Image (cartoon, grey):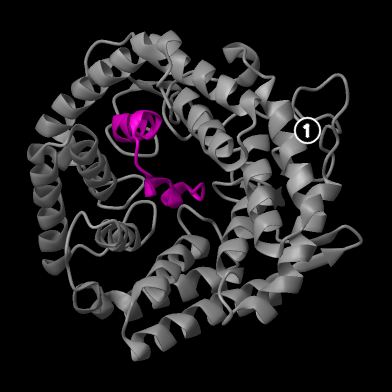
Amino acid sequence: MYSDSRTMNNKALLESKLKDIYDVLKNSGTNEKHHGVLSGSSGISLFQFYYSRLIDAEEPADLGVTTLSKIINEINNGYTYPTFCTGIAGAGWVLELLNEEEFIDIDSDELLSDLDEYLFVSMKANTDEGYYDFLHGAIGYGCYFLKRYQNTQNTQLKTRYKDYLHYLVTALKKSALQDQAGTYWKTMLDHEKKMVGVNLSLSHGLASIINFLSRIYAFDDFKDEVKEVLIQTVEYIQHQKCYDSSSTSMFPTWIYEGMDKVPKARLAWCYGDLGLGLSLWKAGKALDNSSYKKEALTILRNAATRKDRIEAGVKDVGLCHGSCGIAHIFHFMYKETQEPIFKVVAHHWMDQAVTMATHNGNAGYMQWGGEKEQWKEETNLLEGIAGIGLAMISFLADFETKWDECLLIH
């Protein structure tokens, strides 16, 4: 993406920053406590392998193999945390993607199939309580099983994964609520306040359900089962738009009784208009629905006008809620549409990412947040420098990068 003379200097800055990130992860990247793709060591291996391809060098890939070997050994020795974000489902997904991208050559059926029953039981526990969270709940397991369904060449295993996915879709449909707007699911929005409502986000809510259903709809085994619930959930989302001249965002973060009618959502991957626009775009493509795609572009074009960091609520650089997450989504949408506005705003937010490297250590990047609302070092993909590095790689690469499937983007 950085190819014209105007931005060659930025290209050099990104290459330098990637070297800094690589050096940090070379020394500390395998010290993550957990092994999931978004918040664990397997996500760091994605950076190592893609960086190896970018600079055409073996050392980063060798480190990636070391990272994966440690993960596999720990799982074999009793590591049991199951989720997509943080645990085994995410690590399994990474192994599948790396095999698919020809970074590694493994028999994933032999390596991963023994984990199936444990992960299915974990997913079922979530569906039993109506917990469809992408990062930590049933939709995350669904993404893992969908990747296995796509890639396995074993007919028995393919049937197994098809059954698991049918189970998830059936559970979703049984627990869905309906009103005149469409289909939705309620969840706990604030545990302290015991506030229940509808979460619209890509990280935890309806945007991720639409995105997942759009992906599974691509396969004939699921089209008939998925089509109506996908359409009705999109319709519900569209009815929640309450944009007016006093607001910069078009949708609220949550829907709950007594909410402010004028939304003010941050600009980020995790919450807000970017995830909704992206997921409506996925639904429009899956269903070949020009109206959905048009609405998605309206949302994303509006989001592209929000370039002020304070107004947008951007405090750090990570993929979850920082400038690199914003840059990467607009970069993806530029590749999808060739709309110049998306290229311009992607450059803007990536330039912000470079200038925000002002902290001591950790390649200049700290993550803002947590219960104490403070700066802290993170190395993982979702909030840390591995994800920042992957977004930078995607900007520089002359090859396709599919790592961002783990964020429901690609």
Residue displayed at 15% across by 62% down: 72
Q: Locate residue 5, reporting x and y percent.
A: 41, 11
Residue drawn 10% across the image and 56% down it:
69
User: Which residue of the protein is positioned furthest toward the right in this rendering?
Assistant: 180
Q: 293 or 233, which lies in front?
A: 293
Q: Quadrant of the N terminus?
A: top left
Residue 391 on the magenta span:
yes
> From what the image shows, is residue 392 above or below residue 380?
above
Bounds of the magenta span?
A: 384-410
Q: Is residue 47 left or right of residue 252?
A: left
Residue to which mark 1 is pinned: 250
Q: Residue 292 in the image: x percent, y percent?
A: 77, 51
Q: Quadrant of residue 224?
A: bottom right
As for residue 85 lying within the magenta part, the answer is: no
Question: Does residue 255 appear in this view?
Answer: no
- Residue 228: % across, % down: 76, 72
Q: Secondary structure at mark 1?
A: loop
Task: Count all numbered tags in the image, as a single digit.
Answer: 1
Q: Is residue 220 above or below residue 344?
A: below
